[in-house]
Amino acid sequence: MNNGLWILVAVVAALLIIGLITGLVLYRRRRISLTAPAPSQVEPGKAGDRGGGYQAGGGFAFSEGSRASDTATLEPPTTPEVTPPPVVPPAAPEPQAKAAPAPSVPAAPSQEPVTEEPAAPQAEPEQPAAESVPAEAPAVEEPAVEEPAVEEPAVEEEAVEVPAVEVPAVEPAQAATAPPLEEIEPTTGRLDRLRGRLSRSQSAVGKSLLGLLGGGDLDEESWEEVEDTLLIADLGTATTMKVVERLRQEMAARSVRTEAQARALLREVLVDELDPGMDRSIRALPHANHPAVLLVVGVNGTGKTTTTGKLARVLVADGRRVLLGAADTFRAAAADQLQTWGERVGADIVRGKEGGDPAAVAFDAVAKGAETGVDVVVVDTAGRLHTKTGLMDELGKVKRVIEKQAEVDEVLLVLDATVGQNGLTQARVFAEVVAITGVALTKLDGTAKGGIVFQVQHELGVPVKLVGLGEGPDDLAPFEPAAFVDALLG
Ligand SMILES: Nc1nc2c(ncn2[C@@H]2O[C@H](COP(=O)(O)OP(=O)(O)OP(=O)(O)O)[C@@H](O)[C@H]2O)c(=O)[nH]1
């Protein structure tokens, strides 16, 4: 072969490589619709950022927490440590490969959280931890400020406990042999993709409502049936009364006669009731000098760990560097489960010893997140038994200890839609302990009681931001009132 031919071959090869790279870049841009805020649109730290998150084509919306977190004492991230930026292969057009099923954990008895007792040694993590102080203490950064007494009316010993005792229990976990990274389903159009699952369980409600309303003039008996249908779907008494009252007025005023008219009216009333103007963005965008911090709370078995893992995938697909904090130290399997979720998408994890102090793990996760320059730290907490005051106090402590370093931008309450009213009771208790900023409603694929969405928002005044629609790793969607009502009406 002469030189000319070799040059030609080299040129063709170079062109092919350039073409491939360009194609890959364009493909990734199309797949991930969320982009970093343009400076003109969102300025870090501005109060106006709240709700100014980006949302494209039914994708997830992220925003920057609006509170005083920029005043936190953390130094700007220095040289990133071991955590490599996640490099996730582009999503294939077909559904998630079966080779990588969601970590499977037997469902905890979420319907009866009240009766479950915590394991005895877990209630007092401080005692064993105190003995393990000397060996590992130097590795962990301690909080610079003692927790002010005024912040800790209920748990007096905390100021001493947190820095000195629990921190050594934390073990930053690095995957020794990292498994191959997984593909992540596109983050856009998730609710469309998963709508079928919602419809399957909900459409009976819609059909029965439309059957009743579609005929025009309703007698009292029919209105009672409408009421019953809404109550059975778990809309709750207050919302049901409000919806029926408005339907009665509007049906008369608009002379509704056909099923199409009834459907349009019902849709309008239900969507309004879901308050579509609420800010449903996830406050997961980093601050100028430290990562965003998300705390995931909820009763055991609701799907906290699964939702944390799914959310990490969405964030990674959005190009964010994510660190997971496994503050569920009560159950070693929970940390293992979270670690597996992290490894699958290249998210690092900080976990603690079983029975260690969850607050110490959370603290260290945020510290490590800042040190390694990640965008967002997502902290999974233990399944709290909402009747156990001590455990709820501890959840409050987790939040306060994190706040020694940085504001918690988002407190996501995970509720299991299948437990109905019980979920609301849980929500109220959690809301008293930590200021919930959003709700992730899981297992909506398996219940006709999606009406709980209305109650949760109505009762807590907090938006449902995410919905879980299956056990698959990418079966998490942003909550969209109109799409939800459409699925409800079939
Ligand atoms: N069908 C369905 N199952 C879900 C969904 N979300 C979570 N699950 C399942 O619910 C079960 C419990 O999920 P976990 O994430 O372990 O719950 P948890 O709240 O972390 O539980 P603890 O670790 O015990 O506190 C698992 O089997 C999940 O696969 C969902 O949206 N739909």
Image (cartoon, helix red, strand yellow):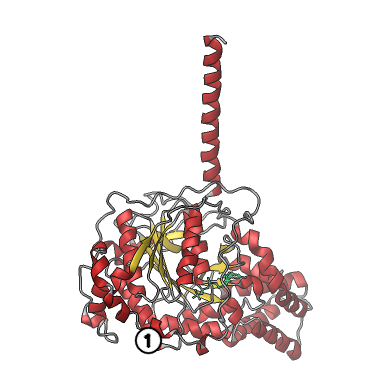
Answer with left or right where residue 138 lies relative to residue 97: left
Q: Is residue 463 visible?
A: yes
Residue type marked 1: Gly
On the image, numbered disc 1 is attached to which residue?
390
Q: Is residue 403 visible?
A: no
Residue 64, compared with residue 237, is above or below; it is: above
Quadrant field for ligand 1: bottom right
Decide if ligand 1 comes within 8 Å of the CB at mark 1.
no
**Residue at the spot x=36%, y=61% of the render?**
172
**Considering depth in this image, is 261 or 316 the residue closer to the camera?**
316
Residue 183, compared with residue 295, is above or below; it is: above
**Considering depth in this image, is 193 or 66 the residue closer to the camera?**
193
Answer with left or right where residue 354 lies relative to residue 137: right
**Residue at the spot x=52%, y=90% of the render?**
115
Residue reaching furthest top? 2
- Quadrant position of the N terminus in the picture: top right
Residue 203 picture location, percent across and down: 71, 72
- Quadrant position of the C terminus in the picture: bottom right
Mark 1 Cα within 10 Å, few/some/many (few <14, many 20+)?
A: some
**Residue at the spot x=53%, y=54% of the render?**
56
Instruction: Name the element at disc 1.
Output: helix
Residue 296, compared with residue 151, is above or below; it is: above
Residue 141 picture location, percent across and down: 25, 64
Residue 304 picture location, percent across and down: 50, 71
The image quadrant of residue 418 is: bottom right
The image quadrant of residue 272 is: bottom right
**Considering depth in this image, is 382 or 311 the residue closer to the camera?**
382
